[in-house]
Image (tube, coloured by chain):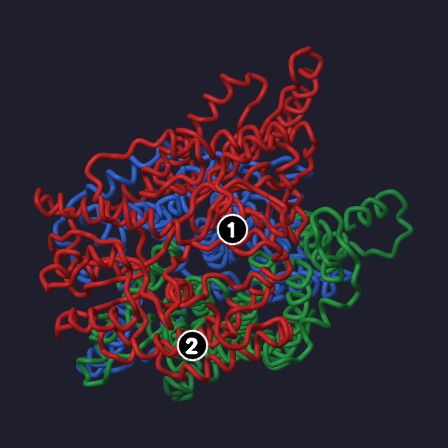
Amino acid sequence: MATTGLYSQHLNNRKVLYLRNAVIALVLILFAAATLFPIVYMILSAFGPNVSTAGNMRTIFPSRWTLESFQAFFDFSPHSLRWIWNSFVVAAGTVVGNVLFASMAGYAFAKIRFKGSSTLFGVILVAMMIPYQVTQVPLYILMVQKFSMTNTYAAMILPSLCTAYNIFLCKQFFAGLPTPLIESAKIEGCNQFQIFVKIVLPLGKTVLAVMAINTFMSSWNNFFWPFLVTNDPAMYTIQVGLKQFKFANETLFAPMMAGATISALPMFIMFFSLQKYFMEGVTIGAVKG
Amino acid sequence: MNETKVRQLKNGRKLRFTNEDLWGYIFIAAAMIIFCVFTLYPVFNAIYTSFLEYKPFGSEFVGLQNYVDTLKYSKFNLFYKAALNTLVYTAVVVPLSLLISFTVAVMILPFSKKTQSVFKAVYYLPGVASGVALSVVWLWLYDSSPDGLFNQLLGFFGIPAQNWLSSTKTAMLSLMIMALLSSHGTQIITYIAALLGIDNSYFEAAELDGATFFQKVRFIVWPLVKPTTLFLMVTGVIGSFQVFMNAYMMTGGGPDNATTMIGLLIYNNAFEYGKYGLACAQAILLTIVIAIMSLFQFRLMGVDVEY
Amino acid sequence: MKKIIALLLACVMVLGLFAGCGSSQEPEETQAQSGNQETAGAQGDDSGDAPEEDTIVVMAPPVTGNYLASLKVWAEDFKKEYPHLTVEVIETSWGDHSDKLSTMAQAGEAPDIAEISSGALGTYVEMGVAIDISQYMSAERLADYDANALSYMSLEGTVYGLPLYLTIQSIGANKTLMEELGIDVAKIQQEGWTYEEFLDVIKLGTTDERFGFVFANAGVTASDMLNIFGAGCGLSNNFTEDLKYTFTSDNMLTLLSAIEEMTQSGYMPNYGVEAGQRMVMCQTGNAMIFGKAMPLFENNFRTNNAALDANDGTAVENSLKMDYAFLPVPTMMGCEESCYGTVDGLIAMRNKNTTDEHLENVLLFMDYICSGERIASCMNELYLDPVCQSGRDALTLEEGRDPDNLETAARCIAMVEAPPAGVTAEMTATAKKLMDEQIVPKFQLLLAGEATAQEVYDHICEAAYAAFGEENCVSGKIG
């Protein structure tokens, strides 16, 4: 496996090896604890009593363990489960679009020398720098007025079907692929499409997995755009739905946390099912030889 | 635009496009169409709007007035204060979070696959929780009363309770800590993906030369993950310059505008005060600054000369 | 086992992806078709002899827990009365309603009717999307609404919308504890109190375990403290009757000095308190008086007392049984007693479909939901008095409400001073920006003990002079 060579394997002294790993593990665990705290708190309060306002949640463990907050979440709206499904459809659609289109474009910008490529890439980068607060009004006019897409999955998916961020990510990774490998494939008669499918995609599994999970996550957590283009509660995504738990003078705190916990579940599943790809890594050497 | 070029090529054959050009355009066609419709069109629209006193029914062309209003210096013009805040926030958060992510990614490597996957999941988790739920938790962590969790922690070390988000001394720091502890998941797994791509033969060779661990990191790992670092840095700076949600949810820009960021200012002008043209002008100015910073980063990292 | 689970998960993911892909593209086409049908249908129905079909779009957040559900019922009832009018309800969430409305308005796609708080009216008037409603409804119907509340929905004499309710914001207290300490709560509720009396009371209520007073003032909620205590100090409005800006008056300095005194007295926390905690601190016995408070909170205390009696674990953790008293805000400088109030209402908005006939239909529905038993049921939920005669006539009070609180609330509502006529949209917009960008931020410094009242006051004056011109700002004392 790649990269294991970074750490010395020749330590004969097992004690030193263990000590080293123990120190590293301790640092990692401390950092992990700090990182995890908010989400652990979220999950724990979801299993607590069905209270509003968070003000009295000063203890980490709930005063008693119950599923009533989950019950309250599902009772709150007849569409609760539909919200999760909607989020899933939107996120999955966005992931498929990005994996397909951004990887192709990323490869082209990284390895194909075509006229205007650097200009086009520069334009893509600059467009990414404009804050979304000012582009969402024209985008809203486009989707709602021109395309009449209110309350559709398309309206939620299309604007992020192929993001500049992912094109940039793919370009950076594919630029690291050995050019001689691609050149030799060309000499053997492969066209660019064959090269992309047979060489680039297999080698790029890792980055595709990273892209898939990051895209899925950002789409899943996206709130404002779905909120803008959906008027029908049946078309809400889970993030839009969760906001319904906040009222003028109170927040249905525990049901909201229960909803947030449930909505985090698909992310866990997504993460662990793609985990494999982060583990294997890409051994370019193997392909070369 | 690109499609027409391709079509011309098929029909006429008189254009000077090579086979390689053709493939390039085919590969980017879908991405560019999506990009033009859903990104470029709104961007140009925003640029146009920045020259207007925008009203939904009957805008007025005002030339550079919005830019002048934004840049005109006055004690009460928040633009410069917000710019400085954003700059400070970016200068602290982006390099530190890159450093943390890189260190964690490297430190995970000596462990077994199983342990690695547990750590990766743990670091990635905060990203999966909804921002709304998390901000509630963070507000509670930063509770300024002596019962607040962070204050209890400080009390344990004998440090007096702090007025976290309500004091100018600590408000910005609090937002930085929050950013550093809750937004590194993406960066860590991106780095791990890059690290896994490094061929073992490099290390074997270095090992034979008797290189130490730190030498290996310095001379093999760091240069090889440079494209990733560049990517994370550029996107990190962009994200940080646009940062808005944390300040909006946690402090609303206070106290004494100590946490007012440009993103928050643009948001307020566009949606609170209905000055959409002014907001667009500020956004364009922000974009120019980010673009210059990014160019600087590309130069600094000294890679990507090829494109 | 693990492998099977992993396999299953992978299958689910793959299936989901395909399903997602399929259904994501499907609606695109179907929507486009149905969109065409809709417009075709609307045009086709025009030929009938009955009044033209019309669709009214109303957008609102849950102003009360049941509001959105009720709105749909009312829409159906309305349809029975006016079969040619269909009402479409867009539900929004509380915290994000104004963002969505703002975006839609900027895009020229605003709903026909939208809920706003009166403070935001100026922004929409400036934007050119608010509509003068008096042309589209009868003067007789308009007269049903209290002039006081209507003036919140007006600028320079033009009425842009109808009021839903007038919320009064003041302070609330643990009545049980105050009475135990021998404080005459009823007298305060009936006659009001001065700042000096207030200070004595919170001093009396303070122990090692308990603050006499707590006010949620962290972040943007700092403005609540200025507004609420300002009402007792002649600063109910941003402008005087002769349209001069009030926050530069001596009253402001007195107010700031009083708040400085309070924060440093030890009778209230000298750190920022989050909005969610103030009532909890009162309920757990860690504070005696709290703010901001509304009459509605009586309901929270009653529910909590019931939960404590039932011991079913739904009560606030570590809370005590207590009665709630809604209190008037103390007065300063000998100013007349007053109360801070804001109006939330519905406004008519311009969009592509706007025609005169359409607006008449829109106003018909707007008036329908703002009056009569519809508004009465909302006000019962909010523990507020309706601001229209038909609403008051339809109101039947829920059982078991505390008569003293009811009376105090009614007394306070009557004291609320509406903004003076003649204030322009531009003036309110400037005042809003000044408040958000200059006054509240500096006031936050005062609360954190990082600036003195005088410093904050000087900054406010300087900023206000720059914004309005010194001649348009009050100097000296008001009231």
The quadrant in which residue C422 appears is bottom right
Residue at 39% across / 29% down in the picture?
A: C373
Chain coloured red: which letter?
A: C
On what subunit does the disc labeled 1 rest?
Answer: C
The local crowd at label 2, few if under 14, some if 14 to 19, many if 20 or more residues have their Cα within 10 Å, is many
Q: Amino acid at mark 2?
A: Met
Q: Is residue C263 left or right of residue A191?
A: left
x, y percent for residue A89: 47, 39
Q: How many marks?
A: 2
Q: Which mark is residue C200?
A: none
Q: Report the residue marked by disc 1.
A: C118
Q: Colour of chain A?
A: blue
x, y percent for residue A254: 26, 49
Residue at 13% across / 43% down in the picture?
A: C306
The quadrant in which residue C267 appears is bottom left
Helix, strand or loop at mark 1: helix
